[in-house]
Image: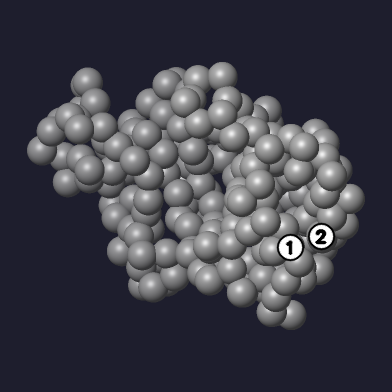
Amino acid sequence: MFTPKFIKFFKDLAKNNNREWFNEHKPDYQQFVVQPMAEFIEAMAPRLKRISPHFIADPKPHGGSMFRIYRDIRYTRDKSPYKLHAACQFRHELGKDAHTVGFYVHISPQEAIFGGGIWLPPNEELGKIRHTIADNPNEWKRIKSSTKVKKLFGGVGGDGLVRPPRGFDPEHEHIEDLKRKSFFLMRNESPDIILDAHFIDEVEKTFRAAKPLMEYICYAQDVEI
């Protein structure tokens, strides 16, 4: 699905991150980025269904699993209009945006990242996850201490607060996790992995390894998996 021209497009875009260049090379973007990403998403659909029927793989380039290349520049000093990576999220069927629990794939000239979790959920949903960790510490510990989780992902990731969140015991055994604002298991590889014929197998294997965390988050939010 993916070829070296996928990576080359983003390397060239990094040197020419402006609308004039992008519009001139939009056919390349469609052929070497959008099309293979859509094919990848479509090929992942039956594999994802075997992992869980509640996560959606939609190959539509607009309104589907694929993220748009356009950056939101309203609240940043960096006004370059385009992202320097391609990404897709296989989010839960009940979710509406990128802050929903889901599986994720991100590819840039520097790295390929894939796994699962939840990124900056709304306060109510974040509170549910934190309370579930506080009330079910043994199951959380089992996920964190899994040999597969440590080997494949290096542990649970996600930025956190400096101080413990209000209402939680600062001495809790999982206080560093209770501080988190996001929870995910992400595998980080060289971008060359996307050129391997078995890349899609590696993504499926990685999603399966992340499933215990996904189950935990879905349990916290009272949604099916």
Res. 79 in view: yes
Res. 225 in view: no
- The residue at 42%/21% (across/down) is 123
The extreme bottom residue here reads 197
For mark 2, does the 10 Å Cα neighbourhood hold few (<14), some (14 to 19), or many (20 or more) residues? many
| Left or right: where 151 falls relative to 203 | left
Compared to 30, does 130 lie above or below?
Answer: above
Q: Residues at badges 1 and 2 in contact (C-beta under 8 Å)?
A: yes
Q: Identify residue for label 2.
A: 32
Q: Which mark identifies residue 99?
A: none
Query: Which image quadrant for residue 28?
Result: bottom right
Q: Nearer the viewer, residue 131 or 125?
A: 125
- The residue at 29%/55% (across/down) is 141
Q: Nearer the viewer, residue 159 or 27?
A: 27
Residue type pointed to by label 2: Phe
Compared to 213, does 71 lie above or below?
Answer: above
- The residue at 33%/31% (across/down) is 131
Q: Identify residue for label 1.
A: 6
Q: Secondary structure at mark 2?
A: helix
- The residue at 20%/40% (across/down) is 175
Quarter of the picture containing the N terminus is: bottom right
Q: Secondary structure at mark 1?
A: helix
The extreme left residue here reads 171
Q: Position of residue 56 (x, y in %)?
A: 75, 45
Alpha-carbon span between mark 1 and mark 2: 5 Å
| Left or right: where 172 falls relative to 79 | left
Q: Position of residue 213 (x, y in %)?
A: 47, 52
Q: Position of residue 163 (x, y in %)?
A: 17, 30
| Left or right: where 36 falls relative to 199 | right
